[in-house]
Image: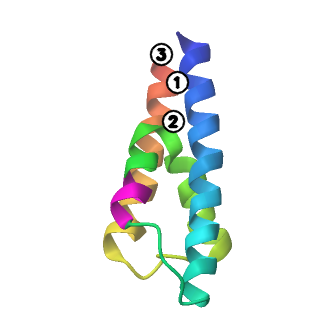
């Protein structure tokens, strides 16, 4: 069970990180964007640590209050789940 959650968080975090980078790139290119709903969905299923790291790395969504406070809180929730399980 623990291994499942670790794999879930690692894979979803990689996807979340990549999605933040892609969305930032697309924003600069005036291209189609990844919806905020999709970014949040990936974070909710375990990708919050990677999404948060992507926000910081790519300086993306850092001015959005929901992302600014929500990603760190969601990351703490997922890290707590990993510790408890």
Residue behind mark 3: 85
Q: Is residue 41 above or below residue 2?
A: below
Say whether residue 72 is magenta: no
Residue 69 at x, y = what percent? Answer: 37, 65
**Is residue 26 at least partly visible in the picture?**
yes
Whether the magenta-drawn stretch holds residue 39 is answered as yes
Q: Kindly identify which residue carries mark 2.
A: 79
The crowding category of the residue bearing disc 2, from other C-alpha atoms within 10 Å (few below 14, some 14 to 19, many at least 20), is some
Task: Say whether marks 2 and 1 touch (CB < 8 Å).
Answer: yes
32 relative to 35 in the view: left or right? right
Q: Which mark is residue 83?
A: 1
Residue pictured at 39% horizontal, 44% vertical? 44
Per the model, the C-alpha gap separating discs 2 and 1 is 6 Å
Instruction: Please give the name of the residue rendered at 45% of the width and 44% of the height, measured from the top-left corner.
Output: 76
Tags 3 and 2 touching, CB below 8 Å: no
Residue 3 percent across, percent down from the top left: 62, 15
Question: In the rendered structure, which segment of residues is drawn in magenta?
Answer: 36-40
> How far across and down, in percent of the image, does residue 7 sit?
63, 26
| Residue 59 location, quadrant | bottom right
Q: Are marks 3 and 1 in contact (CB under 8 Å)?
A: yes
Q: For the point 61% across and 89% down, which residue is it?
A: 29
Q: Main secondary structure of the magenta part?
A: helix
Q: Nearer the viewer, residue 76 or 10?
A: 10
- Of 55 and 36, the residue lying toward us: 36
């Amino acid at each position: 069970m623990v291994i499942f959650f670790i794999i879930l968080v690692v894979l979803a975090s990689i996807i979340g990180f990549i999605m933040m980078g892609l969305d930032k790139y697309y924003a600069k290119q005036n291209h189609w964007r990844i919806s905020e709903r999709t970014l949040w969905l990936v974070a909710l299923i375990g990708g919050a640590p990677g999404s948060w790291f992507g926000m910081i790395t790519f300086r993306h969504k850092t001015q959005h209050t929901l992302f600014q406070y929500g990603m760190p809180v969601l990351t703490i929730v997922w890290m707590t789940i990993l510790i408890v399980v």
